[in-house]
Amino acid sequence: MSSIMDERVSDEIEALEAILMDDVTIKRVGDVPHIIETVLHPSTGNDVDRQYVCATLVVKLTPGYPDSSPEVTLRNPRGLDDEILANIHMQIREKLADCRGEPVVFELIELIRDCLTESNLPSGQCMICLFGFTKGDEFIRTQCYHYFHSHCLAAHLISGRRYYQEELELLPNWQQVTRAPFKEICPVCRITLTTIEVETLADAPPPVASFTAAPFFLTDEMKELQKKMAKLLAYQMSKGGVIGCGDSGPPPLTITTPEDNENNENSNGSPGASNEGAKASSGIINGRQNGNSSNDNSCPGSPAARPAYRGPYRGFNRRGKPGRRGRGAAR
Ligand SMILES: [Zn+2]
Ligand SMILES: [Zn+2]
């Protein structure tokens, strides 16, 4: 019995490796295949640019496989909302039940690929404008499988570059030459975007929903939410940072207040450090390395020294506050 099983499994593994080649990873314990992993995309022929969703299929072979079902998970789903994922999982369970006793990995790949092809449209919102994607929208999928309206991403990257340039010009010459060059980064996962042509994107029209959306007004519900969030923020600040589930180490993000910055200024020996950014707002979120390593202009005594945050959103807190050299999102 076991030799038959081995043959079924080994045939399947051999076929997977022959057909998927580098696209499949087989993890073995000794000689025995244990975990099969492959990244799946929708079927769009050779047109990779039209693949808007993907997911990694992970099949863990149980000792009795294929007479017992393997453990199947989908990891790193991109562009798929919870409803679609739940539907795929349901179909996977049905397929596993139907195919007990026979190798099932190819069946799973085909099933999931079909589901991805059906759902090959970004779901959810553009994380820049928070509108969804509708018919007529021009949108882009980054190499990290995040979606934005082309118009929104272009505006974001253009303002990021402009901010970088403006900050650069404020630095003394010796710091200008050593400053890392501007990089276009994904506003969601901060990976460096290498395949984006900003000028082309900038030609795209604004999101369709931005023309038809109801005018914004503050509802009672939102006011309640604001109160709740203000309370949460106060709690997080009293704890010294944004709190993650089960966090034990230092918080990945820390919130500094103008007072913190003044205290820092007094204790870190950079009396010349200007905290204008911090003073201009009631709370600023900085990276973990707040204060030193990433603060490339924190030279003691330098009149141009500023807090570490350098992203394009830094103008957000200063909206409507004049006298900041006119930089930032308020323009
Ligand atoms: Zn957008
Ligand atoms: Zn990303």
Image (spheres, rainbow, N blue to C red):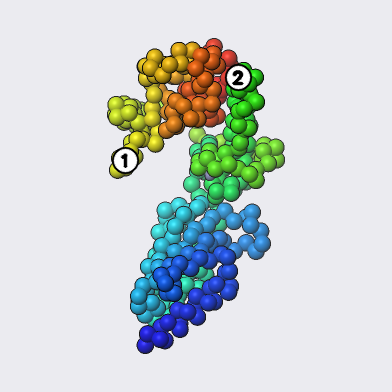
Q: How packed is label 2: few (under 14 Cα within 10 Å), some, or many (20 or more)? A: some
Give the secondary structure at mark 1: loop
Across and down, in percent, residue 94 comes to: 39, 71
| Residue found 42% across the figure and 33% down from its top | 288
Give the secondary structure at mark 2: loop
Dividing the image into 4 quarters, which one contains the C terminus? top right
| Nearer the observer, 106 or 25 | 25
| Residue found 67% across the figure and 38% down from its top | 198
Q: Is mark 1 within 8 Å of ligand 2?
A: no
| Residue found 62% across the figure and 30% down from its top | 161
| Nearer the observer, 151 or 248 | 248
- Amino acid type, residue under disc 1 in the picture: Asp
Q: Is residue 276 visible?
A: no
Work out whether 78 lies above or below 237: below
> Residue 298 has which mark?
none
| Nearer the observer, 265 or 65 | 265
Mark in the foreground, 2 or 1: 2
> Residue 247 has which mark?
1
- How far apart marks 2 and 1 lie (CA) works out to 37 Å
Q: How packed is label 1: few (under 14 Cα within 10 Å), some, or many (20 or more)? A: few
- Amino acid type, residue under disc 2 in the picture: Leu
Q: Is residue 199 visible?
A: yes
Across and down, in percent, residue 51 comes to: 59, 56
- Label 2 with label 1: CB-CB less than 8 Å: no
Dividing the image into 4 quarters, which one contains the N terminus? bottom left
Q: Residue 97: which quarter of the image?
A: bottom left
User: Does residue 229 appear to the left or right of 122 in the view shown?
Assistant: left
Which tag, 2 or 1, sits closer to the chain's start? Answer: 2
| Residue found 44% across the figure and 57% down from its top | 75
Across and down, in percent, residue 117 comes to: 55, 61
Reading the image, the residue beneath label 2 is 171
User: Does residue 131 appear to the left or right of 261 in the view shown?
Assistant: right
